[in-house]
Amino acid sequence: LRNLREDFLHKVSTRLAKAKRVYVVEDLNLLGMMRRESGFHLSRALAEQAWGTFLRMLKYKAEWYGSEVIVADRFFPSSKACSACGAVNRNLSLSDREFECPECGLVMDRDENAALNLRKYGLAALKGPTGSSPGSYARGDWLCGGTDTSPVYEHPVGEAGSGRSSMAPVRVK
C-alpha cells in the first residue's frame, strides 16, 4: 500500500509540475489539524493522503521542470476572506462548506472562494514586494480591507522601526 501511494504521489506531482508554470498552495498547520477532535475525521484523512510528502515532491519537481510553487502564509485568510469584497468572515468554521460574506452577501462554495483568494495571493507574490509598511495594505488592497482591485498580501510581522515588511510572500522556485 505504501509503494502504491508513493507511486501515485510521484505520478501526480510530476504531471502537475509539467502542466503549469505556477502553483499556489497553503502552508497549513497539518499537525494541529490532525490533533483536533473533529467530526470530519481529518487526522486520518490527512495522514492517509501524505500531504507533506506530496508538497515536497511538487516543490523539487517544479524546480526540475521550470515551474514555481508559491506557499501562502499560514495566517493568510484564504477560506475566511470574501473573494469579491475582501471582508473576513471570522465565524466560518471547518464544518461550514458554503462561504457567506457578511458584508456583500456573496454565497459560494468555501473551497472555490479559497481558491480565488489563493490565486490573488499568487498574483501578488509574482508581482513582488511593495516595500510598504506591514498592515498598511499597499494601494488599499481590497482583499485585506482596502478598495483597490490589485491585491498585495503582506505578512503581519515587520522589522522594528524600518517601516518595511520583514518578509516577502513565501516563494519556492
Image (spheres, rainbow, N blue to C red):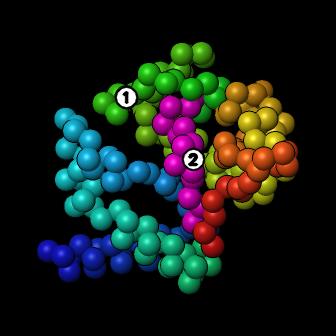
**What's drawn in magenta, residue-wise?**
68-82
Residue 77 seen in render: yes
Quadrant in the rendering for residue 95: top left
Residue 58: x percent and y percent? Answer: 47, 72
Q: Quadrant of the N terminus?
A: bottom left
Q: Which quarter of the figure has residue 37?
A: top left
Tell me the crowding category of disc 1: few under 14, some 14 to 19, or many 20 or more residues within 10 angstroms, Cα based. few
Q: Residue at x 44, y 22 (%)?
A: 91
Q: Label 1 amino acid?
A: Ser
Q: Amino acid at mark 2?
A: Leu
Q: Are marks 2 and 1 in contact (CB under 8 Å)?
A: no
Residue 100 appears at what percent x and percent y?
47, 21
Residue in view at x 43 percent, y 67 percent: 55
Q: In the drawing, what numbered circle is on residue 157?
A: none
Q: Which residue is mark 2?
A: 118
Residue 22 is at least partly visible in this image: no
Residue shown at the point (49%, 24%) measured from the top left: 90
Which of 163/26 is in front?
A: 163
Instruction: Based on the picture, tell me whether residue 57 belongs to the magenta stretch.
Output: no
Q: Which residue is mark 1?
A: 93
Question: Percent from the top left, x then y, of residue 76?
Answer: 57, 43
